[in-house]
Image (tube, rainbow, N blue to C red):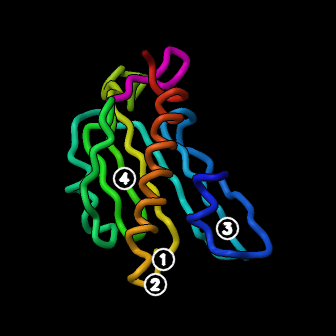
Amino acid sequence: MSRIKPLLPPGEEVREISSKPVRVGASKSCSLVVDKKEDLTVSFSRQTGELDIAYEAEDKYIDLKRVSLGGVVNSAAVADDGAVAWMACSPKPNQPQYETPETKQGRYSHLVLEVHAGDGVKESENIEEWRAHIEKFLRAYVSELVKVWCSG
């Protein structure tokens, strides 16, 4: 909760909404709603190849800038309104291995993480602090995501 709290506005009620994945173990999306307004959404999905997510997601975020997370993360970036990361991630044995399991086509090898943090900060003097909170959240989330969704 300590990494999430700075990303949420003050409010009376906070609740979680999780979407039902098309294929269990292939994707997941979760949102935190504060006083009936969606303020933080985290989504991740399995992918089959290499991609520069910092470049590909440029149009989805405000002022997206590359960050280096190291480890299994190939590409990452933080914006005024969220963050993205693309990482090498082979599924664990009990998780889906292929996009099309019937034909064993499209072997999963990567995971993409997308974070959308409300509307961002309105006051420009707080923007660097806001982005630092988003990056701390991204770093912590990637670490835990890899433990749960990636083998070895």
Quadrant of the snapshot with the C terminus: top left
Q: Quadrant of residue 100?
A: top left
Label whose residue precedes the other's in the sequence (2 or 3):
3
Label whose residue precedes the other's in the sequence (4 or 3):
3
Label whose residue precedes the other's in the sequence (4 or 1):
4
Q: Amino acid at mark 1?
A: Asp
Q: Amino acid at mark 4?
A: Val
**Other-residue count near label 3 (Cα within 10 Å), few / some / many at <14 / 14–19 / ≥20:** some
Which numbered disc covers residue 33? 3
Q: Amino acid at mark 3?
A: Val
Asked if 98 appears above or below 75 in the picture, the reply is above
Label whose residue precedes the other's in the sequence (4 or 2):
4
Residue drawn at 39 percent across, 83 percent down:
124
Q: Amino acid at mark 2?
A: Lys
In this view, the residue in front, 116 or 5, is 5
Q: Is residue 151 left or right of residue 78?
A: right
| Element on which disc 2 rests | loop
Residue 45 colored in magenta in the image:
no
| Element on which disc 4 rests | strand
**Mark 1, residue position:** 119
Label whose residue precedes the other's in the sequence (1 or 3):
3
Q: Looking at this view, name the residue that lies furthest to the right.
A: 12
Image coordinates for residue 116, horizontal then vertical, percent = 47, 63
CB atoms at circles 2 and 1 under 8 Å apart? yes
Front of the two marks 2 and 1: 2
| Element on which disc 1 rests | loop
Q: Is residue 72 left or right of residue 135?
A: left
**Mark 4, residue position:** 84
**Mark 2, residue position:** 122
Q: Is residue 55 left or right of residue 139?
A: left
Asked if 107 appears above or below 14 in the picture, the reply is above
What is the C-alpha distance between the residues marked 1 and 3? 13 Å
